[in-house]
Amino acid sequence: MLGLFGMRLKHMELQMDGLGRLIGLQCAATGKCYLAGEAGSPLVRIAVHGQILEPERLQCVTSSVGHDDGSRFLMVFDFLDGAVRLEVEAYAKGDYATFEIMRIVGTEPDVLLWGPYETVISGSIGESVGVVHDGEYALGFQALNEKTLGGFPVDLRLDRFADLPYPDAKVGYDVCAAWPTADGSLLQAFTRNRTRDERRTVWGTPDIPVTPMDGPDAALTGSKIALFGCPADLILQIIEAIELGEGLPHPTIDGAWAKSSPDAKQSYLITDFNEGDIGDAVAFAKEAGLYGIYHPDPFANWGHFELKPSAFPNGDAGMKACVEAAEKEGIIVGVHTLTNFTTLNDPYVTPKPDKRLQLVGRGLLTAPVGIEATEIEVDDPRPFQVSLFRRTAVIENELIEYDGVSEEAPWRLLGCRRGANGTEISAHETGTAVGRLWDHPYDVFFPNLELQDTYCDRITSLFQATGLRQISFDGLEGVYVTGHEDYATNRFVKRCYDGWEGEVINDASIVVSNYAWHIHTRFNWGEPWGAATREGQLDWRLHNQRFFARNFIPAMLGWFMLRSVSNQFEATTQDEIEWVLSKAAGFDAGFALFADMAVLKRNGNIGELLALVREWEAARRSNAFSESQRQQMQDPARDWHLEPAGEGRWRLYPVDISDELLCNPEEQQPGQPGGSDWTFYNRQEEQPLRFILRAVPSYGNTRGMVKRPTFYAGGSYMTFETEIGAGQYLVCESDRIGRVYDANWNLLKTVEAVSEAPLLKRGGQTVSFSCRFEGDPKPRVSVKLFTRGVPEVVAARPGE
């Protein structure tokens, strides 16, 4: 055995030298070393006054072998000529080893650093899960309690790591448990001494005062990690063993570990149900074959999280009734939050602001403030100069908005508007504390750590009282304003997790700490707002799939919206929803289908859209698609159509959709009949014409129309003796039947062409179109042609 200290695990051997450095991390089966660098990596470092220090000596004081849970070692690391001594307890537990700070002798450091441990592995780097592997062998690192944070302190630097790029990373180096290096990767974590007043960077803002904490989580003792090495196909098995062996959160779905359960990737319906229409919402979810419904905005305020009286007049009892009605139909119910974002109408803000709202900083009044004062003198301008969304000062029970700060002493808050947010205007004496509330462009404030706990308790009591089963911690990054980094993240989600009764599926926004990885069921990022279905955060959604894969997180595609027609968008079409469903199938990812109840009831094609969701999701969840098919479906540029072909069987068609083909009456010569010639290339076999025609209103004129639309291709004409009003559609599915729909896909009439649909030959050709335009201004015509390839029959493969 090399070095002063050695430890043998089932799949890994570990050695350390007399300077406390890891000098060997070998695969137990092959002997191959995965540790980078000749000098090795110190197991533990400390930071004092901004200086990072390495251990000067390691002593292995005691060891004992034969414990029921493995072999125990007590190691002592000396720093600063023995002025600081760390006692570390190490356990070899078969699949993994744990290391815990048991005692610190001498002055307690500012920060304790586990690593970084440099490895030669450069394949897959899971920045959140803390695992790196090359497809054959893996090294892993787990933070074993809330105060042990994956990453590296933002206020310290190891220059040879801090600026290394990781373009595919979701978040920065400082919050990542794994990171690439020039020759491999690193694993890292830290624990901060939180018992002291400090000034440091908080949520990207430098030089912010951070309030100290009390209790065990504030101290460095108890900081604890697990290290493991194993064949790459055993990674999740080892992590589950760590969760169970070390008492980490171990969320399940119907008793199965959520990280390996296919049910973690179930899709769900997001809609604004209420006590009166919960039955309709459940019916829509069942029609789509979805397992749950989820309310996007149920709360009248954030902080107290009181349910909207307009939707839930019976409050928590009304939500409970909704949950129970859904459960009778096999549907779970969830709600959306913005974690610790606090709305201005919340009782924590008005009419009397809570003393536990988070401050950017505070100072003292240097002159009395009368009730008519519009300028306020303070001793320290720094908190009031920080650039945020709004400028809100708090003095006793009064909130005051101000325009700016004077440029020189005496420092004054200028342009003060007294009694903001319904608080009481009062006079204030010299020497009274004056603080600056931390706000955000969502027009919210934030709680400190103590008040944050109260938010958690309200969320858990709501779930206990109602039986809610799903939540998203959207805006989880808001906890960073406390100044306590991912400790605040871990504290928030762990307190909620501990307070829930039963299984709760939960996800989060972009904050994915190493410890919280164990709690979150999944992550469902990607928003539909302000963009077409095929464009809404597409790069972000695809980026997420790579992140999920390397971090062993169940795959989700994000939210997608079913729309009614608007000034910006058309109502959702079948080809759009099948594009979403084919991407979900390609990545084997779940998603959220977002639609207001009004849209679900208004749009005429909702039945067809939900039927497509049901079939695609049934095929995806039954493993019907081959790996080759899934790889093709991941391509954003490709379209597909799925049809049922009997129990557990489907026909999968490749689909080509033309670019938008336009016929514009403004481009016609006077007296010329309306018409256009379009070039079209058919990559599939010869087939009858299939199209969607839309009469597009010009300048908002919905009284225009298109009459007698005619198509010519392959020597044949197809004419529909009908009219299509501006904003309406004419659809032909390769036969002689035309269906006219309104702007929200409600069927208006069915018409029959005078002849069969012309054939589109394979290859390049011209498709001609003509019609009569009426109205002032006249509408335009927009056409999309659809061709389908030869279908493949796919079938359910249960258990694969």
Image (tube, rainbow, N blue to C red):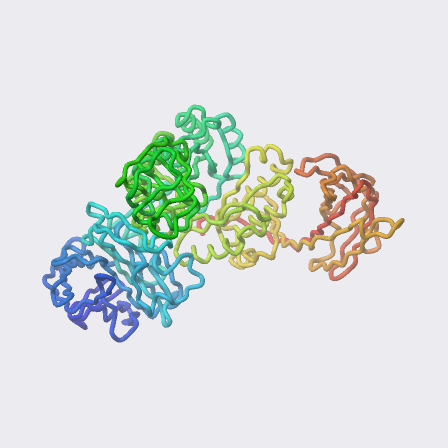
Horizontal arrangement in the rendering, residue 302 relative to residue 457 (left or right) = right
Q: Residue furthest left?
A: 62
Q: How many marks are shown on the rendered structure?
A: 0
Q: Residue furthest right?
A: 671
Query: Closer to the camera, 250 or 771?
Result: 771
Horizontal arrangement in the rendering, residue 569 relative to residue 661 (left or right) = left
Q: Residue furthest top?
A: 314
Q: The N terminus is located in which quarter?
A: bottom left
The image quadrant that residue 369 belongs to is top left
Horizontal arrangement in the rendering, residue 110 relative to residue 637 (left or right) = left
Please tell me whether residue 379 is drawn above or below residue 351 in the rendered image. below
Residue 513 percent coordinates (x, y):
34, 52
Residue 275, can we see it?
Answer: yes
Query: Closer to the camera, 184 or 215?
Result: 215
The image quadrant that residue 597 belongs to is top right
Query: Closer to the camera, 515 or 373?
Result: 373
Q: Residue furthest bottom?
A: 38
Please tell me whether residue 575 is drawn above or below residue 117 in the rendered image. above
Please tell me whether residue 442 is drawn above or below residue 50 in the rendered image. above
Query: Closer to the camera, 80 or 422?
Result: 422
Residue 603 percent coordinates (x, y):
63, 36
Residue 612 percent coordinates (x, y):
58, 43
Residue 456, can we see it?
Answer: no
